[in-house]
Amino acid sequence: MALGAAAAGLRAAGPVARRVPGIEGPGPLTAWGLPVARLAADVSAVATVGALLLAGVLLPGGRGLGPARLPYVSGAAAAAGVWSVS
């Protein structure tokens, strides 16, 4: 959903790049790819922190890492991998 909203916003407004006199423009791949990469970083950061918060604080079950919490920790690990790459 966020990717669709970002694509619609970029399509409507066009890529925003500041022009510096004497320096060539960034090109369409960078102008369109930078907002998409930023979206991936932001979404994966929120997913990592949210899944860890859910597994560590919000789910009932005491102090142990039980079977109810393992899927959220695994999801947080996957989101952290995407976050570290982006």
Image: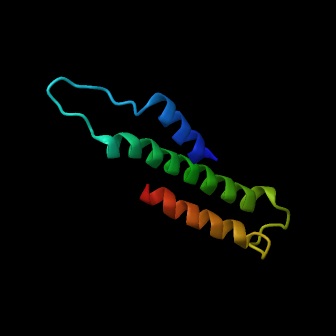
Q: Quadrant of the C terminus?
A: bottom left
Residue at the (39%, 30%) spot, across then down: 16
Q: Looking at the image, how many numbered discs can be counted on the residues?
A: 0
Of residue 80 and residue 59, the one placed in the foreground of this image is 80
Residue at the extreme left of the image, as rendered: 22
Q: Position of residue 14 (x, y in %)?
A: 43, 31
Residue at the extreme front of the image, as rendered: 11
- The picture quadrant where one finds residue 22 is top left
Residue at the extreme top of the image, as rendered: 21
Of residue 37 and residue 10, the one placed in the foreground of this image is 10
Residue at the (70%, 55%) spot, across then down: 53
Q: Position of residue 38 (x, y in %)?
A: 46, 45
Of residue 24 and residue 46, the one placed in the foreground of this image is 24
Asked which colour scheme the image uses, the reply is rainbow
- The picture quadrant where one finds residue 65 is bottom right
Residue at the extreme right of the image, as rendered: 60
Q: Position of residue 66 (x, y in %)?
A: 78, 75
Q: Is residue 84 left or right of residue 31?
A: right
Q: Is residue 25 left or right of residue 6?
A: left
Is residue 61 shown above or below 67? above
- The picture quadrant where one finds residue 32 is top left
Q: Position of residue 27 (x, y in %)?
A: 28, 40
